[in-house]
Image: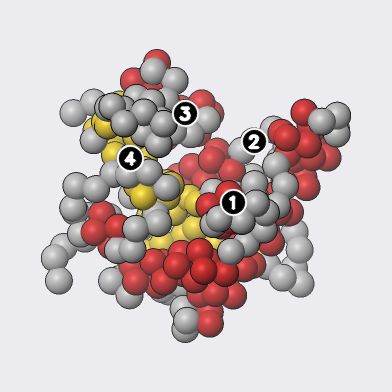
Amino acid sequence: MSELKYKRVLLKLSGESLMGNQSFGIDPTVLEHFADEVKAVKEMGVEIAVVIGGGNIFRGMAGAAKGMDRVQADYMGMLATVINSMALQDALERKGVFTRLMTAIKMEQIAEPFIRRRAIRHLEKGRVVIFGAGTGNPYFTTDTAAVLRAVEIEADAIFKGTRVDGIYDSDPEKNPAALKFPYISYNDVIQKNLRVMDLTAITLCQDNSLPIVVFNMNEAGNLKRILHGDNIGSVVSLPV
């Protein structure tokens, strides 16, 4: 087996990705695919944590835009991420993968409260750790929550699984001539307004020198290939 490029990572998935071709909810086929990908890298000896958004169920900003109180809407969005996290936990455990679900909002009947040292210990013991309920605070996205958790657990990188194979200067699904950036700096992402993650998440990565790897999660085996060092997707980091 080749040496692993990253030994501890946090995988960020959008809630929308769980919909598949549906307009709402969780597509069981997509859920099984994600679980298979996580299991495969877990079996390589990688310590992996996961954060999933809740946009397939409820998005706080969208609710606020329609007149709902923003704080109330954001808390609803946090609870949506817990539903998705529970679904992934179930899919992984049905495949024989040991997991722990930790949430920023206490709900002891279904999850452990997030405690940094305990989360790291779970990873060291070979468990997949799923972080739900964002940061536990309104006005913060799951992108920011994912970066915060990645920094807290001392991850080597944060992986953002998308449906495109990296970062482009425009939408490659709409513009066939879109230019891909195999490597790009945090500052360039911000200045070019590439929307890899929200501004808070990008600057938090920059302040902590945490690389962001953006790749196509829908293609089977991509996660393993990146961990083996293959040049797949795009990497955001400090200038070399």
Q: Nearer the viewer, residue 239 or 88?
A: 88
Q: Mark 2 sits on what residue?
A: 140
Q: Say whether disc 2 or disc 3 marks the residue closer to the N-terminus.
A: 2
Q: Contact, CB < 8 Å: mark 1 with mark 3? A: no
Which coloring applies here? secondary structure
Q: Residue 53, percent across and down?
A: 60, 49
Q: Amino acid at mark 3?
A: Arg
- Residue at the (59%, 43%) spot, across then down: 142
Q: Mark 1 sits on what residue?
A: 15
Q: Is residue 223 left or right of residue 60?
A: left
Label 4: how many Cα within 10 Å (few below 14, some 14–19, many 20+):
many
Dot 4: what SS?
A: loop
Q: Say whether disc 4 or disc 3 marks the residue closer to the N-terminus.
A: 4
Q: Mark 4 sits on what residue?
A: 166
Q: Amino acid at mark 4?
A: Gly
Q: Is residue 217 above or below residue 45?
A: above
Q: Nearer the viewer, residue 212 or 208?
A: 212
Q: Residue 171, percent across and down?
A: 41, 30
Q: The N terminus lies in which quarter of the figure? A: bottom left
Q: Residue 153, percent across and down?
A: 46, 53
Dot 3: what SS?
A: loop
Q: Is residue 98 left or right of residue 183?
A: right
Q: Report, in whole angstroms, how far the alpha carbon at label 2 lies from the one at label 1.
A: 15 Å
Q: Contact, CB < 8 Å: mark 4 with mark 2? A: no
Q: Amino acid at mark 1?
A: Gly
Q: The C terminus lies in which quarter of the figure? A: top left
Image mark for residue 195: 3
Q: Report, in whole angstroms, how far the alpha carbon at label 4 lies from the one at label 1.
A: 18 Å
Q: Report, in whole angstroms, how far the alpha carbon at label 4 lies from the one at label 3.
A: 12 Å
Q: Residue 124, percent across and down?
A: 40, 68
Any part of residue 204 in sight: no
Q: Is residue 163 above or below residue 218?
A: above
